[in-house]
Image (tube, rainbow, N blue to C red):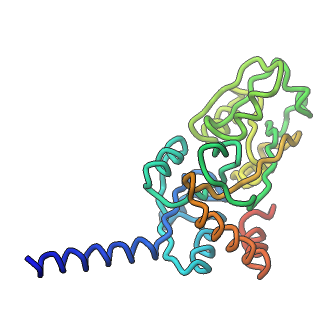
């Protein structure tokens, strides 16, 4: 019996050690250039992925990436499926009252995108009586909901569906994050940006009460900004090409 108990204690100790040395990151791999699946390898790549790995190095933790549906991310965090969310999530999307938030790691402007030959829309004022597409549950949706005079808001599970409807003129415009917009395939040939809306503060999200982890994440972000790694990631993934 003593051997069995001792064996169980050793197993529990090993599991605890493994968990302590792991940082599990939840994200939705459908938002390039922040996170998406490489079409050739199938690997999840992007700015947030590399940022998470760099944070892991500083915290001396192995980073494990878990892909999830966007709408399920906060629920997964609550149920301890991962330690943090790092998925281009804004303060508004996260809901500061229910979670811990890191310092802002990127300021992302929402923009109005229309087809390149559109001559009717040149600013947000021109969206009156128009149909605007937006992703469900996103910060962009919150921005659109504050706009007045829209004929209709078309809500999509993911942004590619909105861009497909825009391409085929089933909607008049899409509101989306700037970095996502300009990294669309053939963007310059097919679309144009006609206005910027409220910027979104992107943050790392943790369970409510995870104050030590929040402090550690903030220190890691500060270090990455000081040593130049953060700027190199921004240049690699978010610079307009």
Q: Residue drawn 66% across and 65% down?
A: 47
**Which of these two is toward me, 205 or 190?**
205
Q: Is residue 117 above or below residue 223?
A: above
Q: Residue furthest front?
A: 2
Q: Image quadrant for the N terminus?
A: bottom left
Q: Image quadrant for the C terminus?
A: bottom right
Query: Residue 13, position in %: x, y?
Result: 31, 77
Can you see residue 39? no
* Snapshot quadrant of residue 126: top right
Q: Residue drawn 88% across and 31% down?
A: 124
Query: Residue 32, position in %: x, y?
Result: 64, 56
- In this rendering, the count of numbered labels is 0
Q: Residue drawn 75% across and 73% down?
A: 222
Can you see residue 201? yes
Q: Is residue 94 above or below residue 212?
A: above
* Snapshot quadrant of residue 193: top right
Query: Residue 192, position in %: x, y?
Result: 83, 43
**Which of these two is toward me, 59 or 70?**
59
**Which of these two is toward me, 237 or 15?**
15
Horizontal side of residue 216 vs 64, given as left or right: right
Query: Residue 52, position in %: x, y?
Result: 60, 68
Horizontal side of residue 194 vs 170, given as left or right: right
């Amino acid at each position: 019996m003593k051997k069995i108990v001792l064996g169980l204690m050793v197993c529990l100790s090993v599991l605890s050690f493994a968990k302590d040395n792991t940082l599990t990151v939840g994200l939705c791999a459908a938002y390039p250039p922040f996170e998406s699946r490489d079409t050739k390898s199938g690997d999840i790549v992007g700015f947030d992925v590399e940022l998470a790995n760099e944070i892991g190095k500083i915290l001396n933790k192995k980073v494990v990436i878990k892909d999830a549906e966007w709408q399920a991310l906060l629920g997964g965090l609550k149920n301890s499926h991962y330690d943090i969310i790092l998925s281009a999530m804004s303060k508004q999307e996260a809901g500061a009252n229910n979670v811990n938030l890191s310092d802002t790691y990127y300021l992302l402007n929402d923009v109005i995108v229309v087809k390149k030959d559109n001559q009717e829309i040149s600013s947000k004022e021109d969206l009156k009586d128009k149909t605007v597409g937006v992703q469900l549950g996103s910060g962009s949706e919150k921005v659109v909901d504050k706009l007045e005079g829209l004929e209709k808001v078309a809500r999509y599970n993911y942004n590619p569906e909105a861009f497909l409807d825009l391409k085929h003129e089933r909607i008049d415009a899409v509101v989306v994050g700037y970095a996502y917009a300009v990294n669309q395939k053939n963007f310059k040939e097919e679309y144009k940006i006609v206005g910027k809306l409220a910027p979104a503060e992107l943050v790392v999200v943790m369970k409510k009460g995870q104050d030590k982890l929040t402090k550690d994440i903030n220190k890691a972000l500060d270090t990455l900004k000081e040593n130049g790694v953060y700027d190199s990631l921004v240049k690699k993934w978010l610079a307009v090409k």
